[in-house]
Image (cartoon, grey):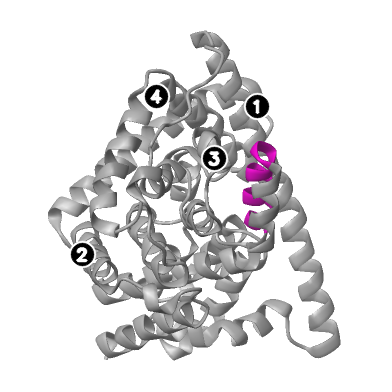
Amino acid sequence: MKYLIAIVGLLVVFGLAYMVSNNKKNIKFKPIIMMVIIQMILAFLLLNTTLGLVLIQGIAGVFTKLLEYAGSGISFVFGGLANEGESPFFINVLLPIVFISVLIGIFQYLKILPFVMKGIGLLLSKVNGMGKLESYNAVASAMIGQSEVFITVKKQLGQLSEQRLYTLCASAMSTVSMSIVGAYMTMVEPRYVVTALVINLFGGFIIASIINPYDVDPAEDILDIQEEEEKQSFFEMIGEYILDGFKVAVIVGAMLIGFVALMEGINNVFDLAFGISFQQILGYIFSPIAVIMGVPLAEAVQAGGIMATKLVTNEFVAMMDLAKMAEDFSPRTLGIISVFLVSFANFSSIGIVAGAVKSLNEQKGNVVARFGLKLLYGASLVSVLSAVIVSIIL
């Protein structure tokens, strides 16, 4: 039965993408089919094999150790701020982003990260039927973040067509950056975080290939990655990445304060007025999508509420809600919803991506703002697609 539901889920996802395609006749089905098969193979290897288990345990172990290192710095500055036995979210989940941001900066400075991103990007371009720039951008988004990635391609922004710009932005919204992966792993099982990171990469290409098909002229597909115009010293770079990481932690914390409080207030108003919370209403609206993702009907409304929360607020709020309701879900449903939540597909990301592009090229930033809702639509379909793929494996 789960395979039948998964087939229906795949057809629905592809159908919804096809409905808004800007060039239905130009869709290349061979790369799409190949990438779906790759997604299934990777999901199976990561979730159902000893090799996958060892790999994920290794990655989780690395992030656990990094969080321990981050904890020493946090304890030095904020030690004694919380009562013994308490675990403040900002201190234990968000502040480690600062340390991981520094590590990303060091790997960038040593040219290790650009080399890896460019290499994987070139390899992916052989599979996805897209340009080298699009492939590089998807990998870079997953490593350095959805706003920072555009700095590395700012030379090309002015020459990009609207179609190519859409794909670059869709990749940025469909993935998550390495700097906050550690934070996710404190709320969601690491194996689902790692699996989502990997298959979302291909999911972004699949959905973009349907919604936004186009051909790239090889002569225009020059992968000339932007280097820093003014060479920084090593310690200048470290200081910059420390501040950048802290800004991310504070911004996420501020958004959580606002969104959690707003959701609580709206839920209370709806409960008093209609006897049902706003999240429950959203749950009923999103429950059909949860069902095609493989969530049992009995759990679909609660799952749909968490999915909707992620869309209208962000993934952190939704992950916190999932942690509170974890006992109400079967292990399989927990896995499916966890994978769905690991992406930047929410309304606030439209502003983040459009703002990042606009800061580098105002004209292109305005173009991104115009197709913002279509961008979110595509990125949300990527999350659903990844959840459907995982439902086949679990």
Is 42 on the left-hand or right-hand side of 345?
left
- Measure the C-alpha gap from mark 3 to mark 4: 18 Å
In this view, the residue in front, 223 or 307, is 223
Q: Which mark is nearer the camera, 3 or 1?
A: 3
**Which residue is rendered at x = 14% and y = 51% of the image?**
51
- Measure the C-alpha gap from mark 2 to mark 3: 32 Å
The number of discs equals: 4
**Rendered image: mark on residue 78:** 1
Q: Position of residue 105 (x, y in %)?
A: 47, 24
Residue tagged 2: 44
Check disc 4 and give the amino acid type. Answer: Phe
**Numbered disc 3: secondary structure:** helix
Residue tagged 3: 150
User: Crowding at label 1, few (<14), some or many (≥20) Cα neighbours within 10 Å?
Assistant: few
Label 2–label 4 contact, CB within 8 A: no
Q: Position of residue 200 (x, y in %)?
A: 39, 59
Check disc 3 and give the amino acid type. Answer: Phe
Residue tagged 4: 107
Which residues, given as a range, are shown in magenta? 348-361
Quarter location, residue 268? bottom right
User: Crowding at label 4, few (<14), some or many (≥20) Cα neighbours within 10 Å?
Assistant: few
Of the two numbered discs 2 and 1 on the same chain, state the one appearing first in sequence: 2
Quarter location, residue 77? top right
